[in-house]
Image (spheres, coloured by chain):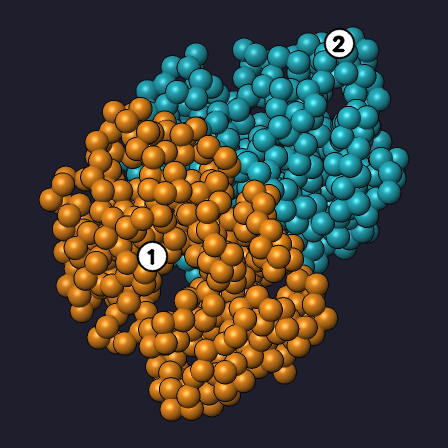
Chain colours: A orange, B cyan
């Protein structure tokens, strides 16, 4: 038995957790940089709760709300410069994966001079601004991972910064912030979380601890599939999805992801297919690929969701994700060429060849 | 759904993990205080592995090997003074709960002046010596908890220091160090771990995350019961028990323990009954007490072990723990008076009255 596991982020989950844990935020520093997108943190109540907690603590803050979907490297440098200019000594990230990931890169760049050519090297000094992360979607799990995914236009894909320095100190999870999310955003993000848990169980770094956490996440998401199909998203369903996305984040924080993420990134970069959806469209082909070599593991995952076959899983995914995008043979060749170069391929329990990747794309589109 | 969860200790589990992770030890400091008992760390190979790793790293060390079973407050102050005298800047604890717990108190006292009257107050400053913990029994889980249990002669019982400062930075778990443990030590420590997992599920702080970890621990220990009965302790069994004790530690790190620990401490203090055994002798009565109020929870725990009734569980515990000690009615009254005063009582899912405690003792002895 081999286990390598760490989870330094302190997790506080539940209704009203931001205000209830204002005292923890008080320990973080004297001036916060609130990192978020243009709109949702204002409309879903999360930013108001954060500002109320900061005010109660007598802490100052500045707001950087220019994080776009699939944030760029330029955005990370811009926010870091703003943090320095404003004299912020800690960060509160509010939003989906985009603000949370951008905030991590900002936390690093605000304390270290790193040229763009070295940004993805993983060779960083010790200091980062301490971070509080508040997810407002239930998918990325970024609040408990050491990763920050940024769009790298030079490499024409999304790339990960990875370092234990990037673990937030605290994650505050309140499902009420998700109550206004559309059914399609809810589905796409839930499928992202599902993909993390599934992939986590199918990496070379899978271990007993990550497997029980992944199983817990998969069972909770499967429980919510019916509600997502019917757009019947109660508070209980929202909480289960948020809990599952956090657990999935804890899994990939330790296992990393697989060829599914490697294949999904070009779909997002070139075809503008949302990240969770991109992974979801690929999962059935991934199961088919692995079923030859590790059939028990694939069956175990399917049965956690209540499916007896990959085909049954695939039907449900089609019901959830609806009509798939068209991807040409030419595009498949190009995307496969990009995907095969990533580390995620070698992290897959059975690493696929370029031909395997081409076949998985073809089976998916 | 409410969750409060933290586990800042990095875990590395597997054969040869001490030497394989020498580089992590290198980051801890320049001179280690090795804290251990008089004998076992030398005979089971763990101290040799630690010294080899330190030598490879060019790190200096001093050895404090005077930790007794159920370490005293005086021992903690003595070790801390030795650490300061020797200029040690980090600690490597090797052993069962006694050296690991004593080492935590030493790590605190080596960096902070705390009078004995304030030792259990929980009001500490920030600094402690960073710690690496290497368990050589599979029971306490201290390698992943923020607790240090010391014998307090003034209070005539065992008492806990509790602070997030006391989480070790790193836990290194290699089941080979347990290969020489006798069957009775293996059983007593396994029952300690079982008690942690069971109690964790029956506290007021129980949550979804701690419950899945507790369930994992309970299932693994239950799997090993047959082997313990037959004294057939293979490497696989040793690893399962070590994994379970670690998971149980992660549970109580977040939930705390219950009246079972409160009742067990006087048995250890006054009757010299080993800690895990003391808890084990009380568990069936604890289940009986709770079955009136939370029958589903008790049934869930029993069924994780494959038992259909408290009676069936009790028979197995008698088989494992053999003849129980005699405890007089007078002693029961005295121990109940001590137990009712502890915080663990109020942490129990259904807090017992003093009369309930008396009845649980009487049912157990």
Between B342 and A189, which is closer to the camera in this rendering?
Answer: A189
Q: Is residue B155 visible?
A: yes
Task: State the image coordinates of residue A344 (x, y, percent, origin top left).
Answer: 42, 72
* For discs 2 and 1, the disc positioned in front in the rendered view: 1
Quarter occupied by the N terminus of chain B: top right
Q: Which mark is residue B333?
A: 2
The alpha-carbon separation of the residues under discs 2 and 1 comes to: 61 Å
Task: State the image coordinates of residue B8 (x, y, percent, origin top left).
Answer: 43, 43
Instruction: Give the SS element for disc 2.
Output: helix
For image coordinates 36% across by 58% down, the residue present is A147
Residue beneath label 1, please?
A: A98
Q: Chain of mark 1?
A: A
Q: Chain of mark 2?
A: B
Q: Is residue B26 visible?
A: no
Q: Which mark is residue A117?
A: none
Task: State the image coordinates of residue B86 (x, y, percent, origin top left).
Answer: 30, 34
Instruction: Give the SS element for disc 1.
Output: helix
Q: Quadrant of residue A94?
A: top left
């Amino acid at each position: 038995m081999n286990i390598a596991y760490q989870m330094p982020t302190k997790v506080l989950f539940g209704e009203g957790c931001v205000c209830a844990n204002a005292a923890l935020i008080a320990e973080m520093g004297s001036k916060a940089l609130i990192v978020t997108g243009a709109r949702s943190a204002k409309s879903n109540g999360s930013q108001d709760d954060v500002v109320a907690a900061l005010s109660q603590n007598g802490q100052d803050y500045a707001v950087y709300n220019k994080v776009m979907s699939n944030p760029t490297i330029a955005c990370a440098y811009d926010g870091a410069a703003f943090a320095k200019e404003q004299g912020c000594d800690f960060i509160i990230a509010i939003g989906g994966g985009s603000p949370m990931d951008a905030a991590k890169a900002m936390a690093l760049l605000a304390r270290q001079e790193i040229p763009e050519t070295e940004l993805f090297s993983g060779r960083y000094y010790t200091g980062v601004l301490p971070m509080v992360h508040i997810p407002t979607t239930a998918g990325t799990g970024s609040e408990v991972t050491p990763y920050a995914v940024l769009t790298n236009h030079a490499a024409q894909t999304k790339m990960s910064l990875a370092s234990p320095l990037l673990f937030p100190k605290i994650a505050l999870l309140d499902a009420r912030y998700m109550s206004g999310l559309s059914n399609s955003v809810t589905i796409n993000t839930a499928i992202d979380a599902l993909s993390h848990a599934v992939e986590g169980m199918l990496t070379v770094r899978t271990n007993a601890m990550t497997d029980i956490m992944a199983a817990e996440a998969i069972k909770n998401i499967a429980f919510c599939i019916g509600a997502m199909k019917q757009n019947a998203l109660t508070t209980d369903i929202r909480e289960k999805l948020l809990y599952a996305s956090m657990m999935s984040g804890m899994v990939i924080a330790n296992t990393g992801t697989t060829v599914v993420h490697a294949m999904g990134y070009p779909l997002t970069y070139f075809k503008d297919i949302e990240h969770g959806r991109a992974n979801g469209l690929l999962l059935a082909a991934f199961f088919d690929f692995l079923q030859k070599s590790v059939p028990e593991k694939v069956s175990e995952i399917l049965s956690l969701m209540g499916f007896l076959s990959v085909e049954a899983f695939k039907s449900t995914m089609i019901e959830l994700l609806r009509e798939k995008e068209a991807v040409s043979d030419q595009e498949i060749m190009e995307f496969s060429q990009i995907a095969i170069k990533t580390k995620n391929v070698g992290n897959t329990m059975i690493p696929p060849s370029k031909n395997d990747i081409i076949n998985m794309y073809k089976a998916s589109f």
